[in-house]
Amino acid sequence: MNTQTKITGVILAGGLARRMNHQDKGLVRYHGIALINYAITAIAPLVSQLLINANRNQDEYKQWGFPVIADQTANFDGPLAGILTAMLNCTGDILVVMPCDSPLIKSEHLQKIISTLQESKSQIAVAHDGEKLQPVFLAVNPDLKHDLQAYLNSGERKLENWIKRHDFVTVDFSNAATIFLNLNTLSELSALEKSSLQS
């Protein structure tokens, strides 16, 4: 980790998981291990401060030993609400963001996003899989918190639209697009477990 730049990480685990029977996705098990554990393994080595954004089961998330922060409102306003609460609690110069339900993401992928932001003069670096943005995988200047608060206060919720309002750079993952597979349903979880056992 660059000693001059302090990095805060946040794992987004604040959603309702409607397509997963409202189970708390971060606590759902993949190969017997909670999904949040995969995210922590990927992000923790890169950051000086790690936050978990969760709006339910907070005591369970606290068992991993990191601060657990809830959205500013109880409306389940999506990933931007989690990013905002992370910005408001951030002690780093950069905030790196990932969701709790992408177990194929590794530290090197997140490091590539962080390094791209550090090497650019942009305010946001966001992953791109060769076809589209993967907007919940990003590194961002936490000074954008006031702008993000105003965006949410205006009733907007779409993360990709907020990113595009700013000077952003994309991070090319076209040669590894499958790493962004996220688990929205129990059947997707089961299928990924089977395919990883066969490979």
Image (cartoon, rainbow, N blue to C red):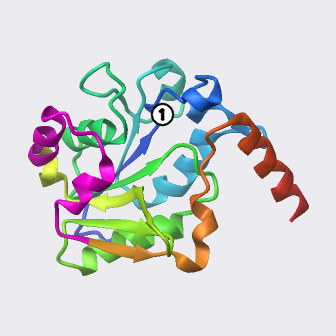
Mark 1 element type: loop
Please state the horizontal and vertical placement of residue 21, each as a whole percent of the image: 64, 23
Can you say which quadrant of the picture contains the N terminus?
Answer: bottom left
Q: Is residue 158 magenta?
A: yes
Q: Which of 135 and 100 is in front in this view?
A: 135
> Residue sitting at 49 percent across and 26 percent down?
16
Can you say which quadrant of the picture contains the C terminus?
Answer: bottom right
Please give left or right for residue 188 compared with residue 163 in the image. right
Q: Which amino acid does label 1 sit on?
A: Gly
Please state the horizontal and vertical placement of residue 135, each as a whole percent of the image: 39, 57
Residue to which mark 1 is pinned: 65
Q: Which of 54 and 68 is in front in this view?
A: 54
Decide: is 22 above or below 186.
above
Residue 26 visible (yes or no): yes
> Residue sitting at 76 percent across and 51 percent down?
192
Magenta range: 146-168
Q: Is residue 8 magenta?
A: no
Residue 77 quadrant:
top left
Please give left or right for residue 17 compared with residue 32 in the image. left
